[in-house]
Amino acid sequence: MHKAIFLTISVLLINLTGCWRSEPILPPNTSPLKIGYLSQFATSLENPVITEASQAEINAADMAIQDINSNGGVLGMDVSLIRKDTYGDEKTAVEAAHMLVDEERVPVIIGAWKSSSTIAVAKEVTIPKKILQISPVSTALEITDLKDDNFVFRTIPSDAVLGTVLGQLMMELGFETASIMYTQNAYGEGLKNKVKTALEESGGIILQEVPHEENIQTTKVSGSKDSEAFWTEQLQTAMKDDPHVVLWIGYAEETNEMIPFSVKHGLADNFMFVDPSLLHPFLKTHHSKACPSPSDAVSVTSKGRWVEALEGTFGASPSGGSSNQAKNLTIQYNNLYTEEGTYIFHTYDAVVLAALASEKAGSTTDSQLIRDSLKDVANPPGEIVGPGKEGIARALELIKQGIEIDYSGAAGPQDFDEHGDVVSDIEIWKVLGGVVCTDQAAAQ
């Protein structure tokens, strides 16, 4: 009898001792939030060099994690980001997504990059496994119509918006005839069709539609005669009937091949692009909100033949937010990093929203609960909260108090519709003096 009492007291003392540890005692089945991050960081497994644009997105995701954790994380625990590279390949993207879900047990995946990879991951992994997926980059119209049970969202507007703007811009600039060179996948086909519709509805004409297969650079040795012959033929086809402008819809690897040959053969006049980061390797300059002075804009030949060839080029792409908090976040990013990219703020917003939704759901593991809370933190009604450390601090405080919030992100408002899409601003930009600028002068 005395022995039994002694054992009971010993167990009680052990349990009490556990309460005196400095580590928090977590509720059953609770663990720190792990966010999967799926994107094309490197060109290929054989060439594992991270591009500047991809590094910029990694920076943005890391900065979001830092801002969240500096405010106590989610449910009092630090959030971690687990990266997997798709190398721009659908099969690799699906395999990586399976690893994130089955091995890492992430309840949320940010990604992917290419729309074709995002769609493949959604159909084969996140939808059947009921995992929340938020893409900060994929813009294909096909994503809108996925039968996804509300598990697929994106923080970047659909190409339905960009395509309309591009078609109207062409007419405003006097480009009544156009040809389109595009990647033959969901992204390229969808955007090409939307631009064509917008231009034709405005009275313009598409003369040539010139497709190239996705990942074409893997079948053509870079800089080889085979590659030159291919791109020269593509460019000559696009220039048939002398269009006022050629719209280029493609990825970085393809752009890096196409532009040199277009310059070499004198076919670089009047291009239009949909992503300024595609031009960074050729301009070697920073994206600027302010255009250079007219005197700088004319003396471009000293900066090299690429700048001379691309001088005056117009484009349009999703813009960042214009709030003071978004501007402060730009300063914060520039103080930490030098890499530039088009999707920095869309990536930042995706990570922050995943974390805020997890806090709102009261769960770091239940993907369905987190999904159900996503619109609660992103859409009205609620107190508007912004990005950055102060914005996130306020958002977390309000959620803990049971007060509704409406996150207005670095890339602008993140109000999801019934398809998980957002509508945000499109900025028109122009290359002047070797600088991609987006102020009022760019539209003149």
Image (cartoon, rainbow, N blue to C red):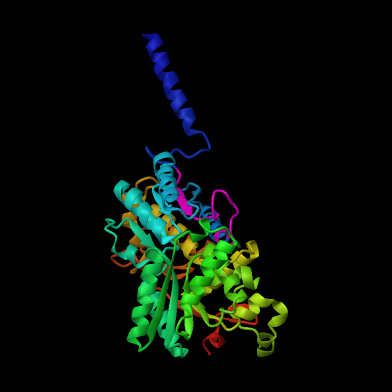
Percent of width and height locating residue 85: 50, 50
**Residue 436, horizontal then vertical, whole percent:** 59, 77
For the question of whether residue 176 can be seen, the reply is: yes
Examine the rendering and report whether any part of residue 398 can be seen.
no
382 lies left or right of 291: left
Q: Is residue 116 left or right of residue 255?
A: left
| Residue in the picture at 44% in, 41% down | 104
x%, y% of residue 437? Answer: 58, 80
What residue sits 65% from the left and 84% below the top?
Answer: 292
Q: How many marks?
A: 0
The spot of residue 110 in percent (x, y) is 44, 55
Front-most of residues 262 and 100 = 262
Front residue of 5/286: it is 286
Q: Nearer the viewer, residue 27 or 188?
A: 188
Q: Nearer the viewer, residue 75 or 302?
A: 302
Task: Tell me where residue 56 sits by quadrant.
Answer: bottom right
| Residue displayed at 57% across by 69% down | 330
Quadrant for the N terminus in the image:
top left
Q: Is residue 332 left or right of residue 144?
A: right
Q: Residue at x 49, y 51 (%)?
A: 73
Vertical order, 18 against 130 (above or below): above
- Residue 34 painted magenta: yes
Q: Residue farthest to the right? A: 302
Stretch of the chain drawn in magenta: 32-55
**Would you say residue 359 sits in the magenta stretch?**
no
